[in-house]
Each structure stands twice: as C-alpha cells, then as structure tokens.
Image: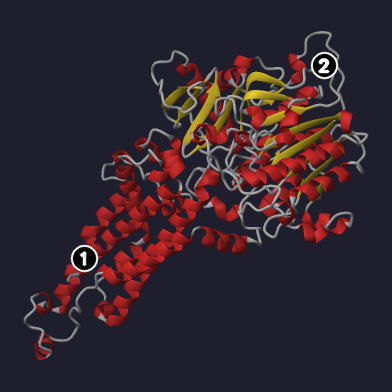
Amino acid sequence: MQPLACVALNLLLAYVVYFLARMAYMLDNWSYFHDSLTWEVLQGGLVFDTSAILVTNIPYIVFMLLPLHWKERSWWQTMCKWLFVVVNMLALVANLADAAYFPFTMRRTTTTVFQEFQNESNLGSIVFTELLHHWYFVLLAAAVAFGLWKLYARPFSGISRSSSAGLQQQGRKNHVWRQLSWWRYDLATLLSLAAVAPFVVAGIRGGFTTAVRPITISNANQYVDRPMDAALVLNTPFSLYRTIGKNVFVVPQYFSDPQQMEAIYSPVHRPDEQTEAGDTLAFRPKNVVVLIVESFGREYIGALNSTLEQGCYRGYTPCVDSIIGLSTTFRWSFCNGRKSIDGMPSILSSIPMFVEPFFLTPASMNEVHGIASLLSGEGYHTAFFHGAQRGSMGFMAFARKTGFQDYFGREDFDADGRFGGEADFDGTWAIWDEPFLQYYCAKMSEMPQPFMTAVFTASSHHPYRIPESYSTRYPEEGIIIHKCIRYTDMALGRFFQEASRQPWFNNTIFVLTSDHTNLSDHEFYQTDLGGFCSPIVIYEPGDTLRQPGLMLDKVAQQIDILPTLMGMLNYRKPFFAFGQDLFAAPADSTWAVNYQNGIYQYVRRGHVLQFDGQSPRAVYSLEDSLMQHNLLGTLPLQDTLETELKAIIQQYMERMTQDRLRP
C-alpha cells in the first residue's frame, strides 16, 4: 500500500477516535446535552475535528510523505506508528478529562488551565480520584489504544536505493510499485506531500475560500442554538492550541465617538456628582465582611427557590435560609464567571470575566483597585482568608494586588494553636469550612475596627467530601454535592452564631455570595443563564431602616457588590467598578452580563440577549425559564439591549488594553 493511502486510512481512524470522544463527552454530561445532538452539531464537530486532527498529526503526515531514503526501513515506519498512536491517544485523553471537568465550567478547557492550577500541589490525588470515579473512561481509552495499534495501516516495504538489478535479484519485480526506481518513488511521495498540503491548510483554517478566517472557538456557535452546546461542537485539543499565546482582549469598534459610548455606559463612578445639593451624608465606617462560599449556587438555597417543585422545594441550606430571612436579596442574581478565579475579581474588584479569567491574562498587570484598597484609604484594616496553602489558585497574589493588608491561609491556621491545626485539613484542598470559619471569626475579633475582610471557603467542592464525623448526619442524597452544601451551610450557621456574640457584629455589613455555581439536578439551572445563578445576600444586623427578608425585584450580579457597598457606606470619592449600586439604581436600570463559549449574555428589562460579538443570536424573556422561545427579531427592545451591551464590551476591552481600570 502506498504511503498516501496509509495516511488517509489512518486519519480516518483519528476521526473515529474524536467521534467516540464526543459521544463520551455528551453521555457523561447527559443532563446538559440530552437534546443537543443534532445534525448541525455533528457537522460542526467534523469541521473542528478536522482542524484538530490535522494540526496534531502534521509531523506524522510529513514523516510519512517526505522523500527520505531511510523512510522505507522498518524502524522508521515503527516510529511513525508510535507517533500516530501516541498523539491521538493524548487527544482522546484530553477530551475525556475535559468531559469530567465540564460540569464545573460549562465550556471546553483552554490553555489558561495550566496557569490556574500551577501552584497546586494536590493535582496528583485529584487526578487519581477522578480516574476512580470515571473508570469507564480508562477502559474506553485502553480499548481505543488497542484498536489504533491493531488497525493502523502500514505501507508495504518500498524500494531502497539499490539498483534495479539488485531489486530483481531480491525477487520483487512482479509488484508494479516496487518496480519503480528510487527516484520515481521519491518523486511520487514528494508530489503526494505537495498535493496534500493545500488540503491540510484548508482543513486547519476551516475552509478553502479566502473569506474563511482560521476558525476560532467562537465559530462553534454557528452550529448551535445554545452557547452551552458549543462545547459539544468543539474538541479539547482545538481549544488548547487555538488559545496558545492568543491576544485575549480585542477592542471592537462599535462606537467611534468615546463620548457617545460614555453616555450609554461608563464604569467610572463619581458619587459627588450624583449628590443632591445640600446632601452632606457622612461616611459610615462600618465593618465589611464578604463571604465567598465555594460552589454555593442559588439552586441549593430553599429561601431563593419558592417556586421550584410547585413551591415544595426546601433546599439544603436551613441556616442560610434563616439569614436570608433577615437580609436583602434580589429576584435575579448572577455570578459573572464559572470558575473560582473568576469570582474574586468580580466580587472584590467589580471586574467580570470576558473571554478568559482576568488574572490569567496580561491585563492582570494593570493597576487594579478593589473594596480593600478603597477602604484602606479610609483607615480600614483589611484581610483576606482562604484555608488552602498560600499561593493556591493565585488568590494571595490577587489579594495583595488589590489592597488587602493581611492574608491568612492554611499555614496560619495551623500555627494558631487554638484549633485543630493540620488535623482539620481535608486532605485535598484546604481546611474544613467549620473550623476555618471559626478561626475567621476569632481573627476578626482581634482586629481594630473598622475592618474589611473576605473569606473564600473550600469544602463544597470536588471531590465532594465532608468530615467523617458528619457522614451520618449528612448522608448522600440527591447529587453528590448536596451533603457538602449541608455541611457548609451548618458551618456558616455556626459562624454567624459566633459572630453575633462579638462586639463588632452590629456594626458590620455582611455579604454572602458564591464564586460560581456547580452540579445541578434542576433543568432551570442547567440552561445557559441558569448556570450563572448565584445568591447575593446583604445582611446588616444593625440596620433598623431596611425591611428584613426583603427580595427586591431587581437584577444583581457579583460586580455590583463593590459599588453597592460603597453606596451603603456613603463613600463619596470617585472609584472604578463595572457594576452599579443596587440600592441606588431603579429596577429597570439593573442588569447583568456574563460570557460563555464565545457568547455574551446580557440581562436587563426582563429579557436576556445572547450576542456573539458581531450580531445578536437570541433573545429570551426571563419568565421563559427554560429558554425555549427565541424572540430574536420580534422584540422592539432588542436594539436597545444590543447597544447597551456593545458599550459595556468596548469599555471593557479598551480599558483592559490601555490600563485604565481606575477613575
């Protein structure tokens, strides 16, 4: 068999591998994709698989078709076989690993994942745990590896550079191919390589025409109706190599007039300019405590789901429910990203996640402020708490950069001596939530007032374990995370119980939110928008003016936390925040934005607009909870929503690239 025919047959095997990987990806996340497999998805998948297969197999193709005199030798062909099998097995493993990671991110993994976990020392145990949980992927990979090795097409031994007479002496003159002289053989393989090259280039780019740019991750959305389904069209090798060294922030030119854009939307807040004449409200130096609760999605909270399951849903958070009964919440509340590293910038610096996590991009070198730096300027003592080792997830670096004076991690907890120390380590990520939140409360009682602190919990997280002493109290139920939510809820209840005994309690504003959402067993929370539903709870125990247990009919998002707190404290100086003061803004002016698989989602005026950066893709009513009725082109409000979103995007991109994240 000629080398070109062998290359073609073996690349067909690679297509089979990618198809099997896509089916495994879909089946492992069936609750998200149960009605997503359409002809368009398969067609789009073929386009992206072609690009990934050709990019990753370029060395194999070249080695097989280059006219090299040693190419006919057995060891060379064995090397090519190993190269083909190993490369395509790595692609399969990447796809299967990403299938397990999808419920946490709802998108394909990009190269930022290597930065995200570069400081973690526990990845080995996590990978081993996942191998046990996904044992069927191990069997699938083994079966595919065996199949690739056995079905690999290997060319017949060709002609060496001996003379034609020598070939006749070896008895090969009956085979037409082998009767060719060596130079004809070399010419034939060279012509094969030349003929294949344009097809390879076209396949990598996504088409032949000059109008076709090299396809990117966002192109997957042309084959789907839901941004979430773009993950099914894509494959992980493509997502990885297409994001190597790429410029994350590309400034669009929606507005040529900066003043026009500023009039529509500006992230610069100037409270003094909004103060009515004669208004002399003084700054309120109240303590600020921000609780960022790992994976604590809105779905799990009974008090925020009064209509779920015909009003019979009780959730898994009785302690937080009781706090909500004393707090202010919002009818529509969202996180701005799907990862922990998205949550910190959104909550503490009012910077949403567009395209890639903010502090994994070059823009993280910009001058960045946040709640801590603003209040440090008012004489506050500021501290950040996270029960993992210092450096984990890059939290310590970001906390320092945004003005936190102190940082308390696992090492500090161990050295404290008043608690369990190393015995309270969960074995994977961090200190268990219950003891660490007690430590957090104790440390705040040692601080001078006013103080501003934030804590990032860890227990309601993969690998979904709780302390052994609570295993009978919180048994498995529903989905695997529910027992962890119950444990963390108890830990939060104990925290507030202990905090209520402290002298600083009634002089404190508490904000409770999650970094992102997590596993889901309700269809509403598995939609493109539902996957971003996070609680935003504002609790001010010393306030006697605001009605307790009030749910405002407003849209709220994590980036609103900073400006809302500044408003509650009567902070009058200019500051920078992409969000807005939720208490000052009228309901129809509140909005939320997030980004997923190349699509921006903009929530305002009772609707959600999905926009791909060039044109609207869909518009849904917020009352259409399952996002089943696309109102695109039928809603007079659509153009207004699009204009507002364009202003937000261009402001974001311009300021990121120009280092203008300040007033």
Q: Do the residues bearing badges 2 and 1 touch, measured as CB atoms within 8 Å?
A: no
Q: Is residue 642 above or below residue 406?
A: above
Residue that mark 2 sits on: 545
Horizontal side of 499 relative to 607 (left or right) equals right
Horizontal and vertical percent position of residue 257: 53, 21
For label 1, the SS is: helix
Residue that mark 1 sits on: 4
Q: Is any part of residue 174 visible from this angle? A: yes
For label 2, the SS is: loop
What residue do we see at 61% from left, 40% from top?
Answer: 516
* Quadrant occupied by the N terminus: bottom left
Q: Is residue 447 above or below residue 560?
A: below
What residue do we see at 81% from left, 33% from top?
Answer: 288
* Quadrant occupied by the C terminus: top right
- Please tell me which residue lies in front, 347 or 202: 347
Residue at far bottom of view: 169
Amino acid on which the number 2 mark rests in the picture: Leu
At label 1, counting other C-alpha atoms closer than 10 Å, the crowd grade (few under 14, some 14-19, many 20 or more) is some
